[in-house]
Image: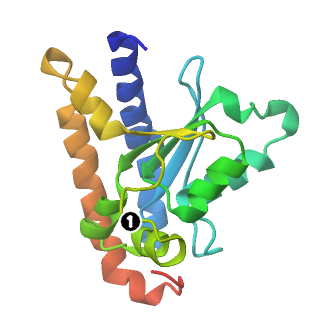
Amino acid sequence: MSEKNARHLVKRLLDVIESDILPLTTAGVAAGNKIFGAALLHKNDLSTLLAETNNELENPLWHGEMHTLKRYYEMPASERPEPKDLIFLTTHEPCSLCLSAITWTGFDNFYYFFSHEDSRDAFSIPHDLKILKAVFNVEPGQYQKENEFWTSHSIRKLASEHCTGEHSCSDQVNRISQRYSQLSDGYQSNKDNNGIPLN
């Protein structure tokens, strides 16, 4: 991928988080859900097919990625692009449940904004890393980020590599980070009342 195309991709992913996912997540957190969201984009033109957010109040399996996949498979087959033709965008590095779902549904990629460590340290949601260690004996950051099924990409790492100088997107990265910090504060202050098993 050329430098120009990589920069365009990063900026588009940031725009989708800010414009498509964050409004849904803001409403979801106000209802009592967690802060995780996801979207599917067409690879050919980077247009948004679908954006969703966490809906664990309805079902504890409806993480941001899982709820997105649920909605994706509710689309009529004739209108549903093949996974190989889509980019899977997620606000936070997927947990073991969502990693498996992305694999089983045939996506060959995902791009995430916040890491597992961010979920634990910045958002006080440590379950991803705890489950990977307790169930799979995988240390933080040690799952295979490139394998025969998919390749994962850190959006913030790509931004630091491709959006520099006059093309910097640091203001948008910071704005998104601050917004999620605010949403996290709201979630944490009310989570004891939401009934989600791993809140």
Residue drawn at (45%, 57%) of the image: 25
List x then y, in percent, for residue 182: 26, 62
List x then y, in percent, for residue 33: 48, 71
Residue drawn at (35%, 38%) of the image: 155
Residue at the front extreme?
137
Which quarter of the picture shows residue 171?
top left
- Looking at the rendered structure, the secondary structure element under dot 1 is loop
Q: Is residue 4 above or below residue 26?
A: above
Residue drawn at (40%, 56%) of the image: 142
Residue 105 vs residue 199, the one in the foreground: 105
Amino acid beneath label 1: Glu
Which quarter of the picture shows residue 36?
bottom left
Q: Residues within 10 Å of mark 1 (few under 14, many from 20)?
A: few
List x then y, in percent, for residue 61: 63, 70
List x then y, in percent, for residue 41: 57, 32
Q: How many marks?
A: 1
Residue 44 vs residue 178, the one in the foreground: 44
Residue hosting label 1? 139
Q: Is residue 35 above or below residue 32?
A: above
Q: Is residue 27 left or right of residue 67?
A: left
Residue at the left extreme?
165
Quadrant including the C terminus = bottom left
**Colour basis:** rainbow
Residue drawn at (61%, 75%) of the image: 60
Q: Is residue 74 left or right of residue 89?
A: right
Q: Is residue 17 left or right of residue 179?
A: right
Quadrant including the N terminus = top left
